[in-house]
Amino acid sequence: MSCACEVAEILRSANCVKIGKFILSSGGESTIYIDLRSVISHPREFRMLVELCARRIRELDFEVLAGVESSGIPLATALALIMERPMIYVRKEQKTHGMRKLIEGDFMPGMKTLIVDDVATTGSSLEKAVSALRSEGLVVEDAFVVVDREEGAGERLEKLGVRLYSMITLSQLTSLLEVKRGGDAKC
């Protein structure tokens, strides 16, 4: 079974693929919504997904994982645990109390950082994370998501000198799930 097939099956099994009318964080509309928040409620599928993701990013050059609030945090945490790497996370907005941080966790300027999120659409959230991390002196050259919706995130990040890696694209996911539904082929 191919890696994309395994991911498609995990997302289907964990009820992460929703069909209907949805407004995306980018403001765009879609008939398909990928809700990776559901996978954390399915420990077997979550573990399988994290293990596949760890294999995918193992060869990338990074010292610290940076989860993007909120959906990137569970994935980054699980990856940090099984890969035994430090983790930080990037808030959407700076806190107005306490330490007033935008980035939580311990890090040092100059650390090579891999951004982790669930889904990439236009790349706006990832771009904000890149900016926040770089403003604190972290080196960001790579970002990783489970699903790339192929709506410009890769190109947007490329302009910032950041490569986008994913487990599966939306077109692959819909194609694989459609084939399975039709019964003509299996992953």
Image (cartoon, rainbow, N blue to C red):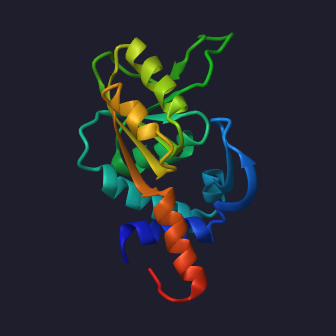
- Give residue 51's quadrant in the image: bottom left
Q: Quadrant of residue 109?
A: top left
Residue 65 in view, yes or no:
no
Nearer to us in this view, 154 or 53:
154
Measured along the vertical axis of the image, is residue 83 above or below residue 94? below
Question: Given the current orientation, which residue lies at the most extreme right position?
Answer: 21
Q: Position of residue 104 (x, y in %)?
A: 52, 23
Q: Residue 122: x, y in percent?
A: 52, 37
Q: What residue is at 28 percent from the left and 35 percent from the top?
A: 62
Q: Is residue 34 above or below residue 66?
A: below
Q: How far from the left and from the top, in percent, is residue 87?
A: 43, 34
Residue at 59% in and 11% down? 99
Q: Is residue 83 above or below residue 107?
A: below
Q: Residue at x 42, y 31 (%)?
A: 156
Q: Position of residue 4 (x, y in %)?
A: 41, 66
State the quadrant of the C terminus: bottom left
Residue 129 visible in the snapshot: yes
Left or right: where 72 falls relative to 145:
right
Identify the residue at horizontal 56%, vertical 88% (top origin).
183
Query: Which is nearer the eye, 99 or 168?
Result: 168
Q: Is residue 57 left or right of residue 51?
A: left
Give the position of the N terminus as an image quadrant.
bottom left
Total marks placed: 0
